[in-house]
Each structure stands twice: as structure tokens, then as C-alpha cells.
Image (cartoon, rainbow, N blue to C red):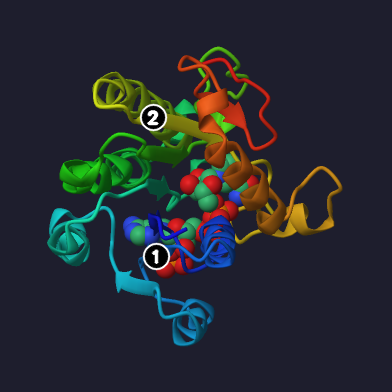
Amino acid sequence: MDKVIVISGAGRGLGFSLVKQYIQLQDTIYAFDYQISNELKALGESYKKLKYYNCDISKDNDVIESTGEILEAGKKVDTIYNVAGFYSKEDLVSIAKTNLDLCIQMYNINALGALRISKSLWPLLQKGSVVVNISSEAGSIGAARRKGEYGYCMSKSAMNMFAKLLSNELWDIGGRVINFHPGWLRTVMGGEAALKSDKSVSPDESAANIVNIVLNIDNIPRDQMYMTHTGELLSW
Ligand SMILES: NC(=O)c1ccc[n+]([C@@H]2O[C@H](COP(=O)([O-])OP(=O)(O)OC[C@H]3O[C@@H](n4cnc5c(N)ncnc54)[C@H](OP(=O)(O)O)[C@@H]3O)[C@@H](O)[C@H]2O)c1
């Protein structure tokens, strides 16, 4: 197969694991990250169909520049993985201490970042294209239990709304959108505690589960578009 796959947040964590999955599938991969990690560079040395770009997804110009080569190539984009995300422990406070500047930063990266990339690549989304957003259970309004973390939770709820709106548009041309909670990941964002807990999941395992669902998306009804990496449905 030579599908065209675009992955943000590809330098480490879940995004990096997704890159490895698609190398196994021998697809063409456009990988974006804020800073290109040595690990991603090393993969690019050995796998020539992996191209990587420095891209801050909170900036319009960065996204326009980074997607330029893909648009020039003009090939259908099969799958976009909006993975890049930002979380800060500073957000782990109740309303009185909530930092609005931090909320704006999270909204800009977590919600608008996915919108920016998808908007830029919209001309290449066609029949069979899939946009995958790595959201979080934290974005579920139906299951909201926290009394704080306004910035992160609200940014992921906004990402969920983005998914629904895009799905309404993309369906008309034969494309799909799906959002995942990837589990509590053993990554930088997952934190030290995730490394020690048996409730957490490795990014490689989560990525493998997600790719398996995405490759079989035709078997999933259109309205089932927010789920865990193991396919358990979540309430919007
Ligand atoms: N970790 C969890 O337990 C958990 C749970 C639920 C949902 N999620 C979601 O899953 C996704 C992946 O999480 P992860 O644990 O793999 O996170 P991670 O290890 O912290 O990696 C985040 C990635 O996003 C990139 N990034 C951050 N801000 C960016 C920006 N402005 N522009 C471009 N790239 C940016 C980072 O780039 P640099 O390396 O250059 O900083 C990094 O590659 C995130 O969207 C997260 O919200 C994670």
C-alpha cells in the first residue's frame, strides 16, 4: 500500500508510535512536530518515505508552510492524525486559580491546531479519507467529573465539536472523522505515575489499537466517532 498519512506530534509519545505503525505498512508519512526529535530524524534516515517538518501547530504560517509540499504533490491524503497536544499541571486547579492565558494556549494548540491542519489539507481530503483526532476522555461533557482543569478539558471538548462539524462536511464527499481517547499513556504527558501504574498503556500498544480501528473504519457506523483506543464508545 502507498497511502499518504499526515501525523502531528510525531516526534515523541503516541505520534511517534503512529509513525512506526505506518512505516510497517510502507506508507508515505508526513510528520509534523514542534521540535524534530533525534528518534524521528533517525527513522527518516532509514525510511525514505518519511518526511518531517518543524511545525508549531498553534501558528497559521507554520502550518501553511509545512503542508505546502503535500499540497504541491497533490495526492489524496488518506489519513490525518491530529495528535499534537499540550497539557500543563498548572491547569490542575479550580476556577479561582485558573490561568486564562494558559487556557488560550491549550485551546490554540489542542483545538485550533487540528482545525488548522485539516483546513490546510482540505483540498486533498477525498472519498475514503479519514481524519483522526486524538482527543481525551477529558473532553467528554457527558462524563465530566473533574472540578478543575478548565483549559485542557474545554480544549478537548472543542476538538470534539470540531470533529463533528468536519464529519458533517466530509461525509458528503465520502470521508470520515473519528476521535479517540488513547488511554493513560506512558509518555511525557502521562507523567511519572503512568510509568509505574498498571492502569496505563504504552504508546505503541495504543497506536496499534487505534490504527487497527482506523483501517477498519468502514465497519463502524457513522455516528460512532468518539471512543477509547480499544473501541469502547464515549459520551460526547
Ligand atoms: N498522555 C496521556 O495520558 C493522554 C491522555 C489522553 C489524551 N492524550 C492526548 O494524546 C495526544 C498525545 O499525547 P502524548 O502523551 O503522546 O503527549 P507527549 O508525549 O507530551 O507528546 C506531545 C507531542 O505534541 C507535540 N506538540 C506540543 N505542542 C505542539 C505545538 N504547538 N506544535 C506542534 N507540536 C506540538 C510535542 O512536540 P515537542 O516534543 O516538540 O514538544 C510532542 O511531540 C495529545 O493530544 C494528548 O492530549 C494523552
Residue designated by label 1: 28
Frontmost residue, 200 versus 131: 131
Q: Amino acid at mark 2?
A: Arg
Q: Is residue 110 visible?
A: yes
How far apart marks 1 and 2 lie (CA) works out to 20 Å
Please rate how many residues cluster around mark 2, counting C-alpha atoms within 10 Å: few if below 14, some from 14 to 19, many from 20. Answer: many
* Residue 123, placed above or below residue 40: above
Q: Position of residue 108 (x, y in %)?
A: 28, 44
- Left or right of residue 25, residue 124 in this image: left
Q: Position of residue 206 (x, y in %)?
A: 67, 48
Q: Going 32% across and 43% down the picture, which residue do you hit?
A: 114
* Residue 172, placed above or below residue 125: above
Tag 1's secondary structure?
strand
Residue designated by label 2: 176
Q: Going 64% across and 37% down the picture, which residue do you hit?
A: 229
Tag 2's secondary structure?
strand
Q: Position of residue 153 (x, y in %)?
A: 48, 31
Q: Going 46% across and 87% down the picture, which residue do you hit?
A: 45
Q: Going 54% across and 35% down the picture, which residue do you hit?
A: 180
Q: Which of the 4 quarters of the picture holds residue 215?
A: top right
Q: Earlier in the sequence, mark 1 or mark 2?
A: 1
- Left or right of residue 63, residue 160 in this image: right
- Left or right of residue 87, residue 144 in this image: right
- Left or right of residue 65, residue 91 in this image: right
Frontmost residue, 117 versus 173: 173
Q: Which of the 4 quarters of the picture holds residue 142?
A: top right
Q: Position of residue 132 (x, y in %)?
A: 44, 40
